[in-house]
Image (cartoon, rainbow, N blue to C red):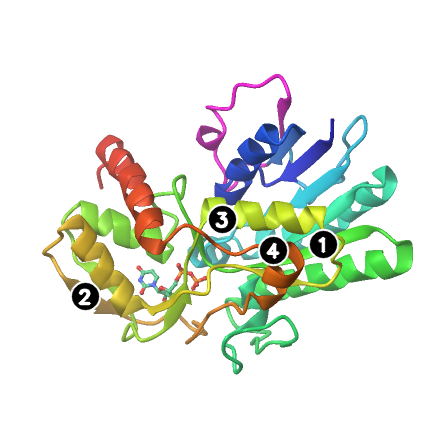
């Protein structure tokens, strides 16, 4: 039976991945410092093949016994979280990645880094393909996340080149689904909560900026396939169906029957204008592409937010 460590396993993607791995017959060690993750996300997992360890991977990471696979998903991931937690974000991207690579080296594990579309910054190439080096402002407020992940990619490649550690690098695009925090500040929870409580949706800027949203189960499938492949260069994992934030807001208002409309607020600094993954590489190497439509994914997510809003009305 494979034994797999999921760092950041109590977060949105991590918790869904833990469940997926258990179904695939893995023994799972879930590690999280619960800074932005939550025990609520994993409380439903009842399996003697599942262990939770509360630990911050910015300190040395020790796990007894063998570890075949390590998924490094530990990091604040929402812009308002990483603006509130800039040093923690840089530490987990840098020291956290270093510590988990050391563990991979010691245990001969395969290590998968959750990198991000943010390595492309405010992209000048559209859609973004893996060969693009990106356009990141290294001293802007978003840099704490973007540059930490760029450093994480560099150190991951260095461990591969220098120590022959088996590595995978996923570049994850906007992901959504049940278990996103109500107050996480990203566009999906904000719009969902606003719409479900009859408030106007807050569009930052003019709403012409685009994003491409991937449902969490598709994302998890892509990460697993990448881990099981032998590809050591970065692979985009995301949904290429792109829309403007204005279109997205209209869709949410339609789906929820919210009549409060839209209000416009200031655009955050360095907010990328366009974002859409080119997933040709994932299709070719992993035989993977998203299968959940935005409509179906949003219906499931809104259902979940409805229950959250009921128990925590704001
Ligand atoms: N956004 C918005 N209203 C909100 C939250 C976000 O218009 O209440 C915009 C944000 O400026 C960005 C896009 O929606 O252009 C996606 O933002 P999010 O924070 O979800 O993630 P990002 O893709 O920027 O990391």
Q: Secondary structure at mark 2?
A: strand
Badge 4 or badge 1: first in the primary sequence: 1
Residue at mark 2 to residue at mark 1: CA–CA distance: 41 Å
Circle 4 packing at 10 Å, graded few (<14), some (14-19), many (20+), is few
Q: Nearer the viewer, mark 4 or mark 2?
A: 4
Q: Which mark is residue 263?
A: 2
Badge 1 or badge 3: first in the primary sequence: 1
Q: Position of 198 compared to 314: left or right?
A: left
Residue at mark 4 to residue at mark 1: CA–CA distance: 16 Å
From the viewer's side, name the closer residue of 103 and 165: 165
Badge 2 or badge 3: first in the primary sequence: 3
Residue 117: percent from the left, percent from the top?
A: 54, 65
Badge 4 or badge 2: first in the primary sequence: 2
User: Which residue sits at x=86%, y=61%?
Assistant: 161
Viewer can see residue 73: no
Circle 1 packing at 10 Å, graded few (<14), some (14-19), many (20+), is many
From the viewer's side, name the closer residue of 69 and 135: 69
User: Contact, CB < 8 Å: mark 4 with mark 2?
Assistant: no
Q: Which residue is mark 3?
A: 218
The quadrant of the rendered image in which ligand 1 is seen is bottom left
Residue 89: percent from the left, percent from the top?
A: 58, 54
Q: Which residue is mark 4?
A: 287
Q: Which residue is mark 1?
A: 168
Circle 3 packing at 10 Å, graded few (<14), some (14-19), many (20+), is some
Residue 157: percent from the left, percent from the top?
A: 78, 61
Residue behind label 1 places its C-beta within 8 angstroms of ligand 1? no
| Image: magenta residue range | 33-53
């Amino acid at each position: 039976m494979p034994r797999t460590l999921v760092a950041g396993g109590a977060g949105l993607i991590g918790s869904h991945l833990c469940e997926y791995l258990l179904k695939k017959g893995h023994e799972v060690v879930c590690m999280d410092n619960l800074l932005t993750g939550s025990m609520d996300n994993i409380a439903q997992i009842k399996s003697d093949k599942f262990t939770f360890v509360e630990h911050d991977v910015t300190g040395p990471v020790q796990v007894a016994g063998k570890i075949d696979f390590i998924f490094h998903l530990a990091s604040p991931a929402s812009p308002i979280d990483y603006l509130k937690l800039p040093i923690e974000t840089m530490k987990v991207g840098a020291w956290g990645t270093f510590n988990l690579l050391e563990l991979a080296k010691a245990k001969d594990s395969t290590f998968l880094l959750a990198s991000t579309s943010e390595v492309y910054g405010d992209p000048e190439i559209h859609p973004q393909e893996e060969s693009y080096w990106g356009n990141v402002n290294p001293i802007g407020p978003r840099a704490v996340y973007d540059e930490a992940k760029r450093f994480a990619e560099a150190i991951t490649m260095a461990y591969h080149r220098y120590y022959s550690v088996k590595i995978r690098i996923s570049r994850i695009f906007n992901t959504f689904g049940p278990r996103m925090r109500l107050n996480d500040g990203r566009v999906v929870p904000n719009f969902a909560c606003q719409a479900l409580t009859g408030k106007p949706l807050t569009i930052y800027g003019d709403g012409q900026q685009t994003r491409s949203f991937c449902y969490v189960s598709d994302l998890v499938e892509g990460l697993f396939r990448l881990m099981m492949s032998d590809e050591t260069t970065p692979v985009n994992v995301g949904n290429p169906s792109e829309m403007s934030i204005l279109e997205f807001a209209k869709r949410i208002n339609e789906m929820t029957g919210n009549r409060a409309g839209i209000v416009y607020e200031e655009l955050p600094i360095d907010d990328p204008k366009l974002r859409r993954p080119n997933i040709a590489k994932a299709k070719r190497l992993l035989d993977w592409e998203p299968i959940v439509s935005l409509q179906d994914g949003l219906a499931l997510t809104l259902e979940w937010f409805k229950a959250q809003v009921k128990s925590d009305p704001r």
